[in-house]
Image (spheres, helix red, strand yellow):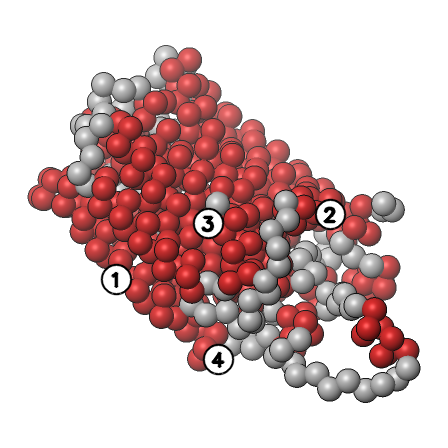
């Protein structure tokens, strides 16, 4: 198969990378035998830039701005508010269920509900990505809107463990998945040089959702009860998704192809792609632990934070993640997406072990929540941007991004139950969970560094 880098970059491209930014190399265009024959005989072919493959590959064909492009970003922002923003507030429901409807169940058992939410949202990636590549975002968004809202409405009348699993853990999260992926994939078709920045603005929707929804839920629960709290949240999500359905449109026409399992396996044969995805997997093994358990931990000894203040920790985390989505995305376009992502990955592991682990008072927990929100926020914007950067054909972005998130979904599924099991094994102490998360996040930093080395070598000054 040749050298590892050869799996994604040709020799001329590697030579070009020695002189310029990896992203400035136009991905190779694959042509059929008829096109090759025409080139050999010098027969001119008139091509319309917007219709053929060149429009998908040529960096100059991307608007990188304008009314239509930024309108899509607004709609995608709404999608992320309603999908990932909802997932970002799972810690509120973990704490609520432990003290109310599901108080007879262990923390580890209850954690399967939020873990299933994260898993189902990510695991649908390959299938939704394939449907997106074949049919575009319109019908996927419509179906996703219905399932997400319907699932939350059903959760509002649930009282049994299995009912919460079916409504909130499966139905709503499948809908969230069908909202999330079209938004992320569509933005990639409108932006090239400013892609990470556009992704950052889009992903900021999840941060705003992660701030607004927990505060809203905390305020509404004592006023109107659990049922109406969920219904109000569902109506707000419905309103925003109507806007998304009207604005999210792909720049490129659908590219229908038959379903092939190999479409999802072939990207993993590319060494930089496979190593990057493995790094994401390791990071996600630890990422959701503070999001899910921080409120419960802070309200217990030895910290003993008041319940009213602890309830704001998830909002603080998500407020900081707003800046973590936008600022690293902007910097990624300037100094390299891998470069920024690697630094923040190591930083996340360091604060996990150096700040969260020894915290015994309110102040370090609040500081940790803010710093953790900023550093993990970069993964939502830079993760898809990195995958797009090493994708030769932007028309395949749906399948490739979906493949990445499907693998990551396994980590999201098992992370919180593992954390709950470690909590039980350590007699209610969070030490084992904290070390588990921090070690895997540091490991992710080393793995992503390896992917960068394969792409551009050891020189830390190179943009990648």
Instruction: State which tag comes first along the sequence, 3 or 1.
Output: 1
Residue 81 in view of the camera? no
Q: Nearer the viewer, residue 73 or 355?
A: 73
Quickly name the residue at label 3.
377
The quadrant in which the C terminus is found is bottom right
| Callout in the foreground (4, 1) | 1
Q: Earlier in the sequence, mark 3 or mark 2?
A: 2
- From the image, tell me which residue sits under label 1: 239
Kindly report the distance in space between the C-alpha atoms of the residues bearing marks 3 and 1. 25 Å
Find the residue positioned furthest to the right: 41
Q: For the residue labelled by badge 4, is the local secondary structure a helix, a strand or a loop?
A: loop
* Disc 3 element: helix
Mark 3 to mark 2 CA distance (whole Å): 26 Å
Q: Residue furthest front?
A: 258
Secondary element at image label 1: helix
Q: Position of residue 410 (x, y in %)?
A: 51, 34
Mark earlier in primary sequence (4, 1) = 4
Q: Quadrant of residue 35?
A: bottom right
Q: Is residue 383 left or right of residue 225?
A: right
Q: Residue 66: which disc?
A: 4
Mark 4 / mark 2, whichever is N-terminal: 4
Residue 374 lies, in percent from the top left, at 44, 49
What's the CA distance linking mark 1 and mark 2? 41 Å
Location of residue 104 in the rendering, given as x and y in whole percent from the top left corner = 23, 18
Kindly identify which residue carries mark 2: 270
Q: Is residue 71 above or below residue 421?
A: below
């Amino acid at each position: 198969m040749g050298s590892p880098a050869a799996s994604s970059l040709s020799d001329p491209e590697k030579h070009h990378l020695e002189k310029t930014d990896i992203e400035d190399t136009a991905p190779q265009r694959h042509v059929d035998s008829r096109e090759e024959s025409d080139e050999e005989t010098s027969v001119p072919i008139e091509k319309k830039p917007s219709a053929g493959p060149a429009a998908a590959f040529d960096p100059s064909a991307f608007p990188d701005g304008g009314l239509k492009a930024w309108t899509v970003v607004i709609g995608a922002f709404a999608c992320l508010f309603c999908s990932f923003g909802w997932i970002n507030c799972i810690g509120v429901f973990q704490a609520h269920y432990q003290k109310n409807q599901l108080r007879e169940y262990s923390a580890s058992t209850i954690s399967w509900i939020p873990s299933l939410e994260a898993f189902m949202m990510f695991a649908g990636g390959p299938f939704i990505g394939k449907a997106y590549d074949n049919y575009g975002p319109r019908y996927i968004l419509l179906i996703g809107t219905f399932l997400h809202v319907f699932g939350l409405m059903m959760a509002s009348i649930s009282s049994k463990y299995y009912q919460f699993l079916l409504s909130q853990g499966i139905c709503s999260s499948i809908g969230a998945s069908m909202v999330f992926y079209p938004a992320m994939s569509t933005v990639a078709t409108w932006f090239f040089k400013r892609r990470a920045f556009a992704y950052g603005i889009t992903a900021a929707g999840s941060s705003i959702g992660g701030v607004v929804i927990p505060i809203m839920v905390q305020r509404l629960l004592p006023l109107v009860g659990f049922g109406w709290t969920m219904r109000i949240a569902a109506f707000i999500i419905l309103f925003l998704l109507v806007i998304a359905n009207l604005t999210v449109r792909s720049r490129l026409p659908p590219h229908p192809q038959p379903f092939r399992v190999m479409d999802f396996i072939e990207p993993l044969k590319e060494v930089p792609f496979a190593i990057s995805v493995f790094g994401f997997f390791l990071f996600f093994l630890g990422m959701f632990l503070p999001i899910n358990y921080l409120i419960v931990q802070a309200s217990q000894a030895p910290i003993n934070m008041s319940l009213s203040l602890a309830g704001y920790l998830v909002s603080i985390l998500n407020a900081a993640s707003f800046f973590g989505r936008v600022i690293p995305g902007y910097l990624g376009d300037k100094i390299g997406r891998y470069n920024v992502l690697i630094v923040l990955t190591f930083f996340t592991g360091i604060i996990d072990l150096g700040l969260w682990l020894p915290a015994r008072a309110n102040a370090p927990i609040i500081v940790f929540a803010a710093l953790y929100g900023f550093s993990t926020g970069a993964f939502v914007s830079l993760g898809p941007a990195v995958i797009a950067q090493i994708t030769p054909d932007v028309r395949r972005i749906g399948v490739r991004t979906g493949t990445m998130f499907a693998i990551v979904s396994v980590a999201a599924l098992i992370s919180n139950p593992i954390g709950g099991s470690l909590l039980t094994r350590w007699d209610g102490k969070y030490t084992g969970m904290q070390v588990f998360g921090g070690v895997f996040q540091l490991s992710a930093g080393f793995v992503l560094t390896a992917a960068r080395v394969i792409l551009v070598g050891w020189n830390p000054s190179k943009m990648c």
